[in-house]
Image: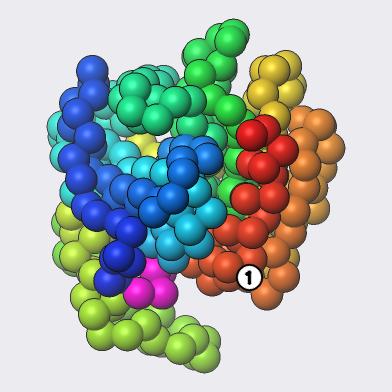
Amino acid sequence: MSTPPFLTLPRCARAVRLDTTRGTFAALEALPDGPLRATALLVPGFTGSKEDFIALLEPLSAAGVRVVAVDQRGQHETGGPADEAAYQLPELGLDVLALTEAVAAESGPPHLLGHSFGGYVVREAVLAAGEPAPWRSLTLLSTGPAAIEPNEAARTKLLLDALTVLDLEAIWQVMKEMEEGSGDQVEPPAPEVAAFLHRRWVSNVPQSLAAMGRRLIAEPDRVPELAAAALPKLVLSGDRDYAWPVPWQSAMAERLGARRVVIEGSGHSPNAERPAETARALLDFWATFR
């Protein structure tokens, strides 16, 4: 899961609830001090939340971008039903269309970004929207053309099995024990961030995690469909992504006819690990369409 580097909102940002035709969604919104140059709608991935983008809020808003980062249905502070049918990709794609409509009503068509599993979701939204698309551009951040890498798929299958017999608190404790016993030298997050990660995990709707996990291990390749969408595209990733290997993402970018940027020194979440470089890559791309 993505680990935010901090939790204190910058001065430009606030927590909001976005009302849409498909319900109310928790979000973080950052507004520029000066003229509005663009709007961005950011969609998190599996086990993630709007806070995964917290370190992007200030640099993007400082460049004149209104930023709206959301919790998808069933994630963290956005509720959802205890029914896997509610979290199938077509449903989540329709949520993004409704969020787009709500955001655009205030500040015009946004740039759309999906991180990890969120890349599947924004792709679904683009394919459902048809032409003309209600976005200015599409960014796929640390996502791939189809199912995740086999070792990651095996770990996800373990989680899916656990969800059938354990509650989220029990799974969290197992994950922590496995992490501590792995021998990996990973610097632990600050205590307040660690507490947030726990709180976020147990706030998820289990059926949401199950539905998303099943798609991650079985998603078909839909790159040809997305390539046909007349929307400028960026494929952005770290240079050490483990969920979808970097060569997979580079090949996907070529097939999409997309701009390709690799952020050095980052893994699966350059938005949290290298936010300044990630923000610059996004701003450079978005500046093309002002």
State the extent of the magenta-drawn residues as a range: 2-6
Residue 167 at x, y = what percent?
Answer: 17, 56
Near-viewer residue (162 or 228) = 228
- Give the quadrant of the C terminus: top right
Category of crowding for the residue at label 1, using alpha-carbon neighbours closer than 10 angstroms: few (below 14), some (14–19), many (at least 20):
some
Near-viewer residue (177 or 44) = 44
Query: Residue at image x 58%, y 58%?
Result: 279
Q: Amino acid at mark 1?
A: Ser
- Let me know if residue 233 is in the magenta part: no
Total count of labels: 1
Query: Residue at image x 33%, y 28%?
Result: 106
Near-viewer residue (177 or 67) = 67
Residue wearing tag 1: 266
Label 1: state its secondary structure.
Answer: loop
Q: Is residue 68 visible?
A: yes
View extreme (front): residue: 34
- Let me know if residue 3 is in the magenta part: yes
Near-viewer residue (136 or 213) = 136
- Give the quadrant of the N terminus: bottom left
